[in-house]
Image (cartoon, rainbow, N blue to C red):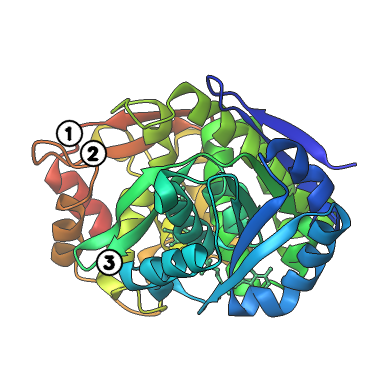
Amino acid sequence: PPARLRVCLDGRGYDILVGEGLLARAGGRIAPVLPARRVAVVTDTAVAALHLPALREGLAEAGIAVAAEIAVPPGEASKDFARLQSVLERLLAAGVDRRTAVVALGGGVVGDLAGFAAAVALRGLPFVQVPTTLLAQVDSSVGGKTGVNLAAGKNLVGAFHQPRIVLADIGTLATLPPRELRAGYAEVAKHGLLQGPLWEWCEAHGAAVIAGDRAAQAHAVLESCRLKAAVVAADEREESAEGGRALLNLGHTFGHALEAECGYDGTLLHGEAVAVGLGRAPPRGGRRRPSARGRPGRVIEHLRACGLPARLADLPRRFSAAALLARMAKDKKVRDGRLRFVLLRRPGDAFTAADVPREAVEALLRE
Ligand code: NAD
Ligand code: ZN
């Protein structure tokens, strides 16, 4: 049987199931949390070709009617207003009503787009996440953040819309391109660094996750979700500036700046940018204490061993420090013009530094 975790929210808590073969048994799992046996599936064309047949079978087995199957082109470009509108038009043309659930089958792009469509169609439809990338299974499918991109930046329009259930089928990871698997693993490592003991596990078993070991993958997904579920339960809407969900941004201030500099052109995957951010999270107060408890040396070593870039020098192109600093100054996490970073004292002990001196960041970028 799959492992089951609960995200505890007032009145709207939900389960995360982690296991193999969940797609082909999806109907029986989701029927109990749906208002009616009717869904619309949103996916991308690449995932549809690989995994939609199993999901169809799983839904049919439980007598769940599929009002529509909507497959968008794969890739970040689908997270935009034009695609959102077309998904909404197709949902309504298929005759969905407020009792019809939207099922997102795919990676974070599909989850964010379908989740936002579910949040706004008819002022809110029930929503189910069936994540098929490691990144989506360990991160984006849990927590209720949905949305699309604007020319001004990523994820600038969206809604909190929690799913009714998350089905993380480890079997779907077998078809994921290795580079996508490694990139998703960067978020597992991040969760490990935030959680503590999970970091030790990552150092011992991260390579197995990357190599496709299903037991290791299931453990990585389960423990990542356990950490994220606890953080989300304590701070559902990211209201805390210092703790709570803000800490999930470990490695992301650098990571987002790198991604933005690349113009999201595919040079760098999100997880690859985050990996460099994890290798760079500056020590407390911006002063360098690199050898404290073997960090960040150990972080860099582990990420590299997993085939991830961990320093700017590992990336396929060079970045200007000034340009990266300018990007960071525009980050959503900047308040009153001060650079905010999530820093790590040691694995399991992260905190937000609200006013990292510009010179300290510059020094790190020059390293
Ligand atoms: P993605 O959804 O683009 O998927 C990556 C690629 O893998 C796509 O080409 C897709 O077609 C393919 N794919 C998906 N599953 C597959 C499978 N099982 N087999 C073969 N190919 C498969 O990217 P992603 O990395 O999953 O998600 C990135 C998105 O997630 C970004 O838009 C990011 O902003 C968002 N995100 C959201 C949250 C959140 O809390 N909502 C958190 C983190 C990231
Ligand atoms: Zn991330």
Q: How many marks?
A: 3
Question: How far separated are the C-alphas under marks 3 and 1?
Answer: 22 Å
Choose top left, top right, bottom left or bottom right for residue 78.
Answer: bottom left
Residue to which mark 3 is pinned:
260
- Category of crowding for the residue at label 2, using alpha-carbon neighbours closer than 10 angstroms: few (below 14), some (14–19), many (at least 20): many
- The residue drawn where x is 23% and y is 39% is 340
Disc sitting over residue 340 in the figure: 2
Identify residue type, mark 1. Answer: Asp
- The residue drawn where x is 36% and y is 34% is 246
SS for callout 3: helix
x, y (%) of residue 100?
60, 50
x, y (%) of residue 263?
28, 74
SS for callout 1: loop
282 with respect to 181 (left or right): left
x, y (%) of residue 317?
34, 79
Residue to which mark 1 is pinned:
355
- Category of crowding for the residue at label 1, using alpha-carbon neighbours closer than 10 angstroms: few (below 14), some (14–19), many (at least 20): some
Check if mark 3's residue and mark 2's residue have beta carbons within 8 Å.
Answer: no
N-terminal of the pair, mark 1 or mark 2, is 2
121 with respect to 24 (left or right): left
Q: Is disc 3's CB within 8 Å of ligand 1?
A: no
Q: Is 61 located above or below residue 242 in the figure?
A: below
Question: How far separated are the C-alphas under marks 1 and 2?
Answer: 6 Å
- Category of crowding for the residue at label 3, using alpha-carbon neighbours closer than 10 angstroms: few (below 14), some (14–19), many (at least 20): some
| Residue 288 appears in the rendering | yes
Q: In the depicted view, which residue is nearer to us: 254 or 238?
A: 238
Q: Quadrant of the N terminus?
A: top right
Identify residue type, mark 2. Answer: Arg
SS for callout 2: loop
- The residue drawn where x is 24% and y is 61% is 153
N-terminal of the pair, mark 3 or mark 2, is 3
